[in-house]
Image (cartoon, coloured by chain):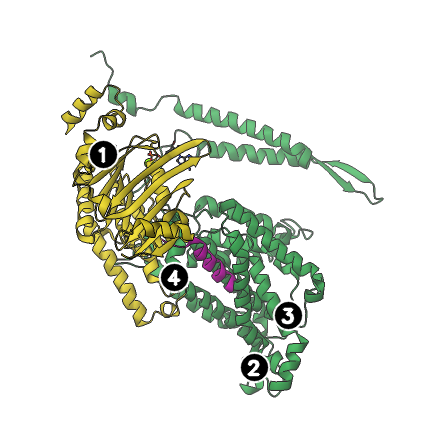
Amino acid sequence: MVGEPLSPARTWETNQILRVDHLSMRFGGLVAVNDVSFVAGRGEVTAVIGPNGAGKTTVFNCITGFYKPTTGRLALFHGGPATDAEVDGVTASGLAWGKSQAGALYLLERLPDHKVASWARVARTFQNIRLFSGMTILENLLVAQHMSLTTSGLMNPVAILNLPSWQRKQKGAVDRALYWLNKIGLVDRADDPAGDLPYGDQRRLEIARAMCTDPVLLCLDEPAAGLNPRESAALNELLLSIRREHQASILLIEHDMSVVMEISDHVVVLEYGSKIADGTPDEVRNDPRVIASYLGVEDEEEAVAVVEAGA
Amino acid sequence: MMASDPAAETTAPPADARPSAVTGALKDAIVSGLLTALLLTPLVGFRASESGTGSLVLTYRFGLVAIFAGIVMVGRFLLMVTVWNPNRPPRRVSTTPGAMARIGALAAPAVKPVFFSFAILYPFLSILMAGGLSPSRYWVDLGIYVLTYVMLGWGLNIVVGLAGLLDLGYVAFYAVGAYTFALLSTSVPINDFFAGTLGDGFWTAWAFWICLPLSGILAAMWGVILGFPVLRLRGDYLAIVTLAFGEIIRLVLINWVSLTNGGAGISSIPPITFFGVPFDSSDTGFASIFGLEFNSMHRMIFLYFVILGLAALTAIVTIRLRKMPVGRAWEALREDEIACRSLGINTTLTKLTAFATGAMFGGFAGAFFAVRIRFVSPESFTFMESAVILAIVVLGGMGSQMGVAGAAILLIGGMELLRNLSFLKADFLFGPDFDPSLYRMLIFGFAMVAVMVWRPRGLVSSRMPTVFLKQRKAVSGSLVKEGHG
Ligand SMILES: Nc1ncnc2c1ncn2[C@@H]1O[C@H](COP(=O)(O)OP(=O)(O)O)[C@@H](O)[C@H]1O
Ligand SMILES: [Mg+2]
């Protein structure tokens, strides 16, 4: 793949939202992520795939600030891509963010987790769902709007006294929650505890909750894991509509090849912490190394046969 | 044809089931009885008591050991053949809510108004029941005492019940509030300053009303100061460090003699006034101004309404905060801290606000405590105090205000009533030498264990959502997390 000319389909190279440069993450002696670089395109679905333990979740945890990477740079662009000079300028300045021609750029490895969400506006879901299970579905979606509701402080007197201006703001938040409830088809269950929902609904609720933070980049960690085919189809539709109607860029970890091939524009393949392939779904699907590693088949010929039979 | 009838095989119980249960129970009971006898022989069987000359004499009480062993044997046997009988058909788990739950659901909307009306009417009811102003002193005083703990429970409930932070040092803020008021109100320079500008009696008359907000603010400030380094810890570690902070504050109060007068405490704290009007028999006192006959109970009843007002303030502010983003963030923090951070919530700041808000109400309660007793000393702020307040929150059901109020009434009121078990001194029971108040704590402990077995999530285990679209439905306690840090 190296040295291959850029195909015209590689839109992510020109309109970047996230640039990961030489990311490494070490846990003691274990190198979970080893010098991984890739970019994610604005308004696109970028899938990160790879066998279990390849380091996908670790990459996500670095991007969202839950882990401090051992080395590497994670640049996120608001508004539009920044030039290399601008990125290097902020890197040299020692600050976590700077203005760029197009908007702003954030170096995510320098931000604590909650600021990655609130400043850089990167939202995420978790491989093992993390809903507020003892709170209702509506409450879950309202907690997600915490940042936009507390712009004038946590103990805002206007809110404590429940003045009309606060009531309007609160109503706006409920409306926004309702919009997402409609989208995931859970309006009727708005007043039920999140912990009571079936698994597929919980997955979609977690995505809706992340979208309520109004993110520029949405990171989904195995959203289709454990879903039945019907739930999986509903999920695909939700993701496509998020991309279509909200111009959100999506970074997606996924095992289910049908989901990956159907909705992603760009696929990055990890194995043992290193990147082994990067391209359009078609390119990756036909990459012999991917076939061998992803399907865990030694014989590449056999692997190709398996993939083609499945496709 | 060869197979036996499967239905008969599965439905007919083994013929020897009942006798074997009884023999098993008998065996079990004998073993338990023997174990009890073995254990109690050294503990109860020998008794060393001082003789008249001062030497120790040994008396044997094997009869008593036999009685205890007999009780255990019979009790164990009866339990084994009834409740614990393995052949007993399993209790049907009904899917429809039981009668109790349905009555509870019907009564739920009435609980709060009834509670508050009763709280407002309580002093007058006591006067009626006791038959006069002066005889009702004990009951009004008990009401004040219980309400103080209701307020403390509600304050700690913000930290433990809503935010899920286990705080074992809550009494520290109670102490800060009490000492803030005690020190400021007895301060000579402040008194002199106001005597020069606003008149002689000004500071004595107004000290409480000026210091009350200050006590709350100072306690909240200490909450932030203590919370900041501590709140990065989680779970058990947080609990231990808050416990230590509670003790440190107490030790500082004991040892900083020049400021706090050490273990001797601060006395002659000015009494509460009716917003500047003193409760005394003078011409400018409360009684003559309102045309009443002077009675020291007037102050007591006013104190009752002050603590009722403070407790109501705590409840109302908490209810309001729960419906605000900060309150939702507290509960979300208790549910899942990592998810909170992924949504951009600054968890340290959010925990700090919970800590400070709880501390503030602890400070208010402390100032009230000081003006009621008119004497503060470090002895009032021991770990036992924190433990009792925490027990109230846990017993009440973490997060539920009515539960906490019920638990405070049960625990504090109940403990107080246990003091009055004088009927146990009757000749046919334990005799006049028996001191029932010694057994107070034992009974208290048993009651706690019993309630926690019966209702492991507290008296009120369900959670009320803060917002609803169509219908407010209680969230079952089994889904609600308790928090880890
Ligand atoms: N916090 C951690 N401490 C130590 N090792 C970790 C930690 N997180 C992940 N790892 C290790 O890093 C490797 C990659 O894990 P992960 O990123 O979860 O893989 P994936 O999501 O691709 O299945 C695994 O070997 C895992 O054991
Ligand atoms: Mg993973």
Q: Nearer the viewer, residue A202 or B78?
A: A202
Around disc 4, counting alpha carbons within 10 Å, would you say few (fewer than 14), some (14 to 19), or many (20 or more)?
A: few
Which subunit holds the residue at mark 1? A
Q: Report the disc number at residue B111.
A: 4
Camera-near label (1 vs 4) is: 1
Q: Nearer the viewer, mark 2 or mark 1?
A: 1
Q: Which residue is mark 2?
A: B276
Q: Chain of mark 2?
A: B
Q: Name the residue tied to disc 1.
A: A256
Is circle 2 on the same chain as circle 1? no
Q: Depth check: give the residue in front, A49 or B50.
A: A49
The answer, for residue B196, to whether it is visible in the render is: yes
The residue shown at (14%, 29%) is A311
Chain A visual colour: yellow
Give the drawing colour for chain B: green
Q: Whole-Å distance between the Cαs marked 3 and 2?
A: 19 Å
Report the mark closest to the observer, 4 or 3: 3
Is the stretch drawn in magenta largely helix, strand or loop?
A: helix
Q: Decide: is B441 above or below B25.
A: below
Q: CA distance from mark 2 to mark 4?
A: 36 Å
Determine whether the residue tagged by mark 2 lies in a helix, strand or loop: loop
Q: Is residue B352 magenta?
A: yes
Residue B445: image location, x then y, percent: 55, 47
In the rendered structure, which amino acid carries the disc numbered 1? Asp
Name the spot of residue A256 as percent of width and height, x first: 23, 34
Tell me residue B76's x, y (percent). 51, 33
Number of other residues with Cα within 10 Å of mark 1, as a class: few under 14, some 14 to 19, many 20 or more: some
Residue B466 visible in the current orientation: no
Identify which residue, A235 or B304, lies in the foreground.
A235
Q: Which residues are magenta?
A: B344-360
